[in-house]
Amino acid sequence: MIHVGVAVANGMLKPPVPSMLWIQSEVREAFGWSEDDDLKSAEGLKQALSGHSHWNIQQREATLSRIREKLRGAEHVVVLGAAVEKTEIEAWVGRNAVFVAADGAVGVLESYKQLACIVSDFDGAVHLDAAAREGQDIVAHAHGDNLRQWSRALSLWQHYPLPPHLVLSHQVSHHIPEMYNFGGFTDGDRALCFVLANDVPAEKIAIVGFSTGKIGAWSATTIPAQKLKKLEWMRRIVSELGFGDSIQT
């Protein structure tokens, strides 16, 4: 049975919408993926940071608290998907708005001044590394197919003069201490789940750059046919959360 409170810590976060957790099992079944692999990656990521001088649990909880304050304090929270264009964010620049970027979509930003955080499964390549080098906040996600990616990234990032700050997330169906399951599947819809888990009212949230008709310019290199299937799952999740009208076709 899925523990619907897996994203709750010390009363800080709202429980995720149950369907946003259940859908993870549906996705695994649809693609033939193993939850054991997801668990192995998640536990490995947590263990790698245990007692780390910059990424220990106290520092990660402080990072989550700081992100939450940014999200709740902003008039608008804008979630950036992989198909976002620079022109789509111009209206938000300079306003009381913060951005939550889905992985490589952080590359659309010319400045990190309004960036609240990046939600990433480590596919953001040079754009993610550039933000990490500037000490940005990253909600770092572990799944069965990215153990090598997070290992490489953390080995690199820990040597930066100003390493990024991390919060750890996973996608298994039971509680993992010191990690969170915010729900969802792709970086984009998981970013939306993360914002909602931080008790940001839906009317304050906008999503841009979410598309099912094309693979976004900020998306990781992938198998096109599989990526389009993943985007259909994104569409379902975002629609169930009430933001389907903002998805481009």
Image (tube, helix red, strand yellow):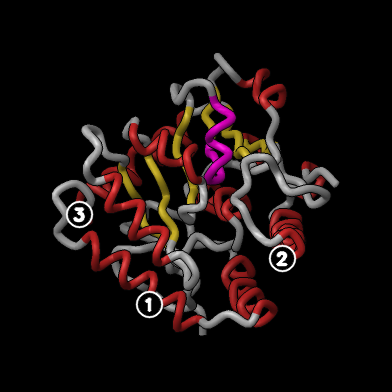
Please say if the residues under marks 2 and 3 sit with CB atoms less than 8 Å apart: no
Query: Looking at numbered disc 3 in the image, what kind of residue is underneath it?
Result: Asn
Left of 219 or right of it: where is 63? Answer: left
Q: Does the magenta segment cover residue 107?
A: yes
Q: Residues within 10 Å of mark 1 (few under 14, many from 20)?
A: some
Answer yes or no: is residue 56 visible.
Answer: yes
Write down the residue under mark 2: 226
Does residue 215 appear to the left or right of 219 in the view shown? right
Total marks shown come to 3
Dot 3: element: loop
Magenta region, residue range: 100-109
Q: Amino acid at mark 2?
A: Gln
Q: Which residue is mark 3?
A: 56
Q: Residue at x 41, y 54 (%)?
A: 140
- The x and y percentages for residue 82 are 65, 43
Residue 87 percent location from the top left of the image: 71, 22
Question: Along the polypeptide, which appears first: circle 1 or circle 3?
Answer: 1
What kind of element bears circle 1?
A: helix
Residue 31 located left or right of residue 176: right
Q: Amino acid at mark 1?
A: Lys
**Dot 1 corresponds to which residue?**
40
| Towards the viewer: 16 or 132 | 132
